[in-house]
Image: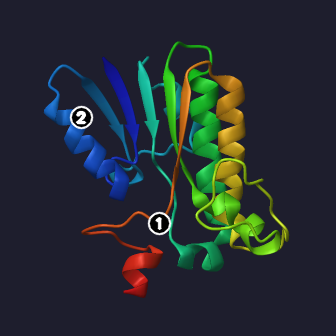
Amino acid sequence: MKILLTGHKGFLGKHLHAEIRKESIHHIITVDRDDGQDLCNEKFVFDLPEVDIIFHLAAYNGTKFFYSNPTEVSLNNTLPTINLIKRYSNTKSKFIFASTCEIFNSSTYTLNYKVPTDENVPIMFDNILNPRWSYSLPKALGENLIANSFKNWLILRYFNIYGPNQKDHFLPEFI
C-alpha cells in the first residue's frame, strides 16, 4: 500500500510515521515543510505519485501564530489542502484529514453548547475579524471540500492532544 503522509515531522506526524514504518508492507511518501517541500506549490503537489491513502496532517499551528500572523496561518492551512484535493480527487485515494475542535469555539461561546461537544454542534464563526479563526476557518473549509470531493474520506477532529516534545501549543505553553 502506498501512503502519503504530510507533516511527518510535526507532533502528530512523527508518531504516525513511526507506526507506519513498523509495517514494512507499506510504502510511505513523506512531505514536510521542514524538508523544504511546499504543499502551497501546486506544481510540487501535482508531481506527487499516486497513493492509496493520504494522511494530511501538515498544518501551521500554534495559538501565538493565530494572533501574530493570521494571514500566513490561513494561507498555509488552506492552499495545501486545496492542492491535495485537486491532485487526488479523481483517484481512488482515501483522504484522512486532521481537523480541529477549534471549529466549534464560537458555537460553545456564543450559543452556550456544553463542552465536551458532540457531532451535532453547529460550526460557526461569529466575528470574521477575530484572528483566532485563522486556523479554524481553513480546517472547516477543508472538511467541506474533502467531504464533497472524495468518496472515501475520514475527518479527525482533535481536542487538545498533548505529549512529549510538543511545541507551540496551548497545553505545553500553559504548563
Q: CA distance from mark 2 to mark 1?
A: 23 Å
Q: Position of residue 65 (x, y in %)?
A: 56, 74
Left or right: where does residue 2 sit relative to residue 48? left
Tell which of 131 and 22 is nearer to you. 22
Instruction: Please determine whether, in this image, residue 35 is positioned above or below residue 129.
Output: above
- For image coordinates 64% across by 27% down, the residue present is 86
Q: Residue at x 56, y 22 (%)?
A: 88
**Secondary structure under badge 1?**
loop
Q: Position of residue 8 (x, y in %)?
A: 33, 47
Q: Is residue 172 above or below residue 62?
A: below
Q: Quadrant of the C terminus?
A: bottom left
Q: Residue at x 76, y 68 (%)?
A: 106
Instruction: Residue 22 in the image: state x and y as whole percent.
Output: 14, 34
Question: Which of the 4 quarters of the picture holds residue 52?
Answer: top left
Q: To which quarter of the image does residue 141 belong?
A: top right
Look at discs 2 and 1 and give the one toward the viewer.
1
Nearest the viewer among 55 and 47 is 55
Q: Answer yes or no: do the residues labelled 2 and 1 have beta carbons within 8 Å?
A: no
The residue that label 2 is drawn on is 20
Point out the residue furthest to the front here. 114
* Classed neighbour count for the residue bearing mark 2: other residues with Cα under 10 Å, few (<14), some (14–19), many (≥20): some
Q: Amino acid at mark 1?
A: Asn
Q: Is residue 10 visible?
A: no
- Count of numbered circles on the image: 2
Quadrant location of the N terminus in the rendered image: top left
For the residue marked with disc 2, what is the amino acid? Answer: Ile
- The colour scheme used to paint the residues is rainbow
Where disc 2 sits, the SS reads helix
Q: Is residue 53 visible?
A: yes
Residue identifier under label 1? 160
41 or 149, which lies in front? 149
